[in-house]
Each structure stands twice: as C-alpha cells, then as structure tokens.
Image: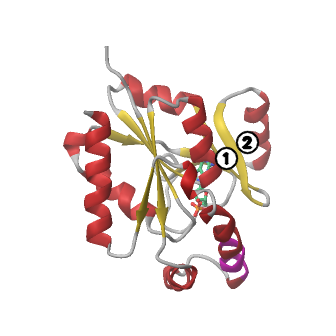
Amino acid sequence: MFDGKLIVFSAPSGSGKTTLVRHLLKQKDLNLDFSISATSRAPRENERDGIDYYFISTEEFKKRIKQGDFLEWEEVYRDNFYGTLKREVERIWNLGKHVIFDIDVVGGLDIKHIYPERTLAVFVKPPNIEELKIRLKKRGTESEDRINMRIAKASVELATAPQFDHVIVNEDLDTALGEAEDLVRDFIR
Ligand code: 5GP
C-alpha cells in the first residue's frame, strides 16, 4: 500500500520557504503535491482560489472549525485564520502522492505531533532578522504595519527551530535548494 508522507516546511514569513517548496514541487521524481490551506485573509492580486489557498470568509472558517474539518488551524495574525483541511491531505494521499506544506511554525509542529513518523519537519531560517526585513520590503505585498507585525512574530518563531527535524539556513539560495532536495529524497525513500 502507498505510504503517504507529510513534508512540512515552516519558517518566519520572508525566509524564502515558498521558493523552496515551489522548487521541490517541480522535481517530479519526489512525487509531491502541495497542501492548499484554507484562509480567511483576502487574496493578493496574483493569488487564485483553489490554487494558492481556499479563500473563505471568517464566518465559514469558524463554522468549519466547529465541524472538526481541520487537521490543524491557527489565527496566525489577528482575524487572519489559516488551516489545513483533513480532506486536503486525504485528497493528495489518494492521488498516491506525498503532501508538502508551506505553513507557519505552530501549524508545522502540530502536524509533526499528530503524525510523528510520517512527517519530515524542516525549519527554514533567514540569515538574520535584518535580512528578513529587507526581503519583506522588497516583496512589497504588505504594508509597513504588517511587515512590523511579521518581524515581531519572526523572533518568537526562530526560538522554535530546535523542535524541528532539520534546520536549513537560507543564506545562499542554491545551497538551500540542494539541501532541501536531499532531505526530502532521503525521507521518502
Ligand atoms: P501568508 O499570508 O503570507 O500567505 O501566510 C502567512 C503565514 O501563514 C505563513 O507563515 C504561512 O506559511 C502560514 N500558513 C499558511 N497556511 C497555513 C495553514 O494551513 N496552517 C497554518 N498553521 N499556517 C499556515
């Protein structure tokens, strides 16, 4: 029987984990599919429903929490709920693929605790907080206020790194991409 795995990439916002996850998804031999999270935040200009996220209202989100539809969920920023639907993981395993997650630190550790053996939990570290600030500003998707909120959260998140199976320091992107590929290839073998 297919032994579906869970690959978690968690990091402070702006650490480059999304780039790593996208790169891994392109490696067809890894047999990965992206876990599309549900969120109550508004879509950014380039984001599409059902591809980047399942965009739902806060009300709908709360209803689904009550129904027990989530494997894990969190109010990552105030009034911005994010969560992994149980159905999403089943969908991917049913395709005969491993699930890869781009989620926050708390959610990532929740998944590791729910499925300790089946999960590879990787923490992606920015070289330092200054660099994180620069990257978030460059990305230009968030207001100054929101950037500061994300930076404040990052310091707390960095402290959780030792709880992960592996830490990748994203200083040089190519090196980080290679490390990520090796880790995943090793784990699913
Ligand atoms: P963004 O608003 O930049 O897309 O995401 C904000 C944060 O929420 C990121 O750290 C992202 O990884 C995290 N996130 C996205 N989906 C989920 C999820 O399903 N669960 C949890 N716990 N965090 C998530």
Query: Per the image, is 107 magenta?
Result: no
Please rate how many residues cluster around mark 2, counting C-alpha atoms within 10 Å: few if below 14, some from 14 to 19, many from 20: many
Please state the extent of the stretch shown in magenta in the rendering: 145-150
- Rendered position, 31 above or below 19: above
Q: Earlier in the sequence, mark 1 or mark 2?
A: 1
Point out residue 54 in the picture as x, y percentages from the top left corner.
57, 46
Q: Residue furthest front?
A: 162
Outermost residue, left side: 29
Q: x and y percent of residue 158 in the render?
A: 60, 65
Residue 156 lies, in percent from the top left, at 69, 65
Helix, strand or loop at label 1? It is: loop
- Mark 2 C-beta closer than 8 Å to ligand 1: no
Q: Is residue 154 above or below residue 76?
A: below
Along the line of sight, the residue nearer the viewer: 108 or 51: 108
Residue at which label 1 appears: 56
For the point 65% across and 78% down, the residue is 147
Q: Where's the N terminus, which quadrant?
A: top left
Image quadrant assignment for residue 31: top left
The residue at which mark 2 appears reads as 61
Residue at the spot x=53%, y=29% of the render? 115
Which residue is depicted at the point 56% across and 67% down? 13
Instruction: Locate residue 63: give its quadrant.
Output: top right
Name the residue located 33 percent from the left edge and 40 percent from the top edge.
32
Tell me which amino acid carries mark 1: Ile
Are the residues tagged 1 and 2 within 8 Å (C-beta)?
yes
Q: Where residue 59 appears, x then y in whole percent?
A: 80, 44
